Amino acid sequence: MAFNAPRLHIISYDIADPRRLTRLHRYLSGIGMPLQYSVFVVELSPRKLARVLETIQDIIDPRRDDVRAYPFPLNGERIRLGRQSFPEGVFLIDSECDLLSLTKI
């Protein structure tokens, strides 16, 4: 995988103020797909990730709010329990995923 290639990330947040919460949710809705209300999956290059984190920094209050970004493992296992977040037949994979290892959940 190229150093600057886009990669899937999970961005999650816990925002204390309803106004900042709404702003951040709207922003992330424009660049990613919600998995849960405060958890998004986004595909970002390292440069784009840096810009997204700068924008988030401008929205939040770092003394009261918590935002975290986690890169998906390139060849990691993904486990889901409970109700499916995506429509039937839609799976969260990236271009490095081995299609033979996918199992329908």
Image (tube, rainbow, N blue to C red):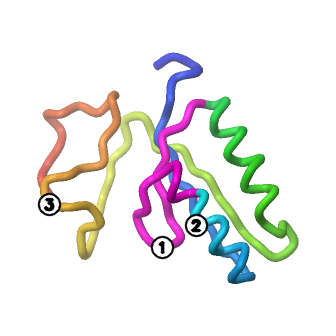
Q: Which residues are magenta?
A: 28-45
Quarter location, residue 81: bottom left
Instruction: Residue under label 2, please give it.
Output: 25
Q: Which mark is residue 88?
A: 3
Which numbered disc, 1 or 2, marks the residue that appears first in the sequence? 2
Residue at image position (52%, 53%) is 30
Distance, label 1 to label 3, CA atoms, is 19 Å
The residue at the far right in this view is 63
Instruction: Residue under label 1, please give it.
Output: 37
Foreground pick, 4 / 25: 25
Please provide percent x and percent y for residue 65: 76, 72
Please provide percent x and percent y for residue 23: 66, 68
Distance, label 2 to label 3, CA atoms, is 24 Å
Residue 20 left/right relative to 103 = right
Q: Is residue 36 magenta?
A: yes
Residue at image position (23%, 31%) is 98
Quarter location, residue 83: bottom left
Residue 6 left/right relative to 24 = left
Foreground pick, 101 / 84: 84
75 vs 34: above or below: above
